[in-house]
Amino acid sequence: MKRILRVLASFARTGALTRAVIALLAGFSVGAAAADPSELLDPQDAFRLSVGALDARTAEVEFRIAKGYYLYRDRFRFETASGRVIAEAKLPAGEMKQDAFFGNSVTYRDHVRIRVPLSREDLALGRTRLKVISQGCADVGVCYVPQEQWVEVKLGAASGSKVSPR
């Protein structure tokens, strides 16, 4: 059992675990029989995340989505480091897609910008750590497991700067 855990830990450090999960999902995915997992982008490359302060009370989360990939609107979730869920995030309209995995779904391609309001507690600290959870797929019929990324947002007047996940 310890050996299996060491192998999984090694896979996790190298990103191979993500590719292994994608390959496993590809085997069960509709239309994915022809998908070569080695040709798929790692999720952090398919869905590039950045964040910045839009104004003194709002963070702007932006995803740049690679060609041939898309994100699901209803699979976004935002939380502060204290565990507070931010349900008031403003997501733009997207494109309706009949999806083999989730049925009728609103999706985003190319890029999406999401406005995330921050609390008074966040504002008092001048910065906050934000957990961003998202999920997307490749057009070849392979979906990624939900991705969880942490970013730090420096608050105050709009900085215009974008910070990538740490």
Image (cartoon, helix red, strand yellow):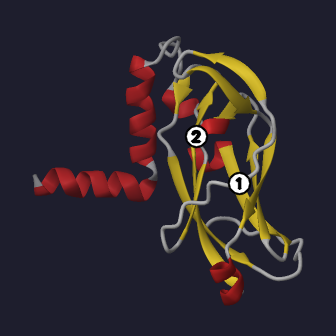
Residue at screen point 72% across, 28% down: 68
What is the quadrant of residue 49 in the picture? bottom right
Q: Quick check: 59 left or right of 129?
A: right
Q: Nearer the viewer, residue 26 or 6?
A: 26
Q: Position of residue 140 (x, y in %)?
A: 60, 20
Q: Quick check: 105 left or right of 24?
A: right
Q: Name the mark on residue 44.
A: none
User: Amino acid under label 2?
Assistant: Arg
Please say if 101 is above or below 127.
above
Camera-near label (2 vs 1) is 1
Q: Position of residue 134 (x, y in %)?
A: 58, 46
Mark 1, residue position: 89
Residue at screen point 59% across, 31% down: 137
User: Amino acid under label 1?
Assistant: Ala
Give the mark count.
Answer: 2
Q: Nearer the viewer, residue 72 or 87?
A: 87
What is the quadrant of residue 14 in the picture? bottom left
Are circles 2 and 1 on residues that touch, CB within 8 Å?
Answer: no
Please say if 43 is above or below 86.
above
What secondary structure is marked by label 1? loop
Mark 2, residue position: 75
Q: CA distance from mark 2 to mark 1?
A: 12 Å
Q: Position of residue 162 (x, y in %)?
A: 80, 68
